[in-house]
Image: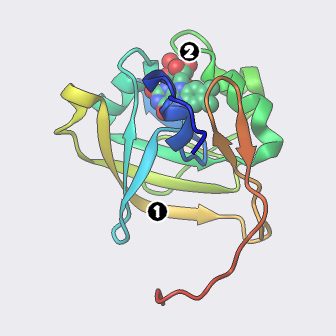
């Protein structure tokens, strides 16, 4: 085995799964968007999603206070915008205008959907017990939208330091899941 030791600071680059999402929030009458790749499915139905939002992000306070967000799933065509959104703060900037993203009203929550994303998950915060210690929110998806025209969405999967993989080949194997 010719493997070499990996610095612990790089472990996230192996496990960070993606797909990268754009999280929209709305607070004090103003919508905002941030890029997020640290999330995980936790339950089938109702769908629960765990995610980490740094307390340094403007979006963090909005989520704590309003307990609502939308997870918008972009494809590779939006990669440049995804990175710009993730490298700027909504504290002063309107990122929708600045980066050409179109907000569309959601049906069950106040934050908007992003029209350019192929899927949108309207979420409420279901559990905040790990926010203080880990900045970890448990979200419940209360409404989900998907573009039926996109049969094989080329989602972005973050590998850290500006590297992404784009979803490609599909393997179909036998499954017990109905
Ligand atoms: C590819 C990518 C993935 C990111 N993933 C996360 C994440 O999972 N959690 C997080 O708190 N910040 C993440 N960020 C950083 C935020 O998107 C960034 O801090 C953003 O500027 C916050 O915006 P806001 O201040 O308007 O909320 C990521 C950034 C990029 C570019």
Give the residue at the far right of this rendering.
77
Residue 79 makes an appearance in the image: yes
Q: CA distance from mark 2 to mark 1?
A: 27 Å
Q: Residue 129's x, y, as percent?
A: 16, 39
Question: How crowded is the residue under tag 1: few (<14 C-alpha within 10 Å), some, or many (20+)?
Answer: some
Give the residue at the far left of this rendering.
129
Residue 109, compared with residue 160, is above or below; it is below
Residue 33 makes an appearance in the image: no
Secondary element at tag 1: strand
Earlier sequence position, callout 2 versus callout 1? 2
| 50 relative position to 162: left or right | left
Please name whichever residue, 157 or 104, is drawn nearer the observer in this view of the structure: 157
The residue beneath circle 1 is 143
Answer with the quarter of the image where residue 39 lies.
top left
Q: Residue 108's x, y, as percent?
A: 43, 56
Q: Identify the residue at horizontal 47%, vertical 53% (top origin).
A: 122
| 20 relative position to 153: left or right | left
Please name whichever residue, 162 or 150, is drawn nearer the observer in this view of the structure: 162
Answer with the quarter of the image where residue 77 lies.
top right
| 8 relative position to 94: left or right | left
Q: Residue 105's x, y, as percent?
A: 57, 48
Answer with the quarter of the image where residue 92 lies.
top right
The residue beneath circle 2 is 89
């Amino acid at each position: 085995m010719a493997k070499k030791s990996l610095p612990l600071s790089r472990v996230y680059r192996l496990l960070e799964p993606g797909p990268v999402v754009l999280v929209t929030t709305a607070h004090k009458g103003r919508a905002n968007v941030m890029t997020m790749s640290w999330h995980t499915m936790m339950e089938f139905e109702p769908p629960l999603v765990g995610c980490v939002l740094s307390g340094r992000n403007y979006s963090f306070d909005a989520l704590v206070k309003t307990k609502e967000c939308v997870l918008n799933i972009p494809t590779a065509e939006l990669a440049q915008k995804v990175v710009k959104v993730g490298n700027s703060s909504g504290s002063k900037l309107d990122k929708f205008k600045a980066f050409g993203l179109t907000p569309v009203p959601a049906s069950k929550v106040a934050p908007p959907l992003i029209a350019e994303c192929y899927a949108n998950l309207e979420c409420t915060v279901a559990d905040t017990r790990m926010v203080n210690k880990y900045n970890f929110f448990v979200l419940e998806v209360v409404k989900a939208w998907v573009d039926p025209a996109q049969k094989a969405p080329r989602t972005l999967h973050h590998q850290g330091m500006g590297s992404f993989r784009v979803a490609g080949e599909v393997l179909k194997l036998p499954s017990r899941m109905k």
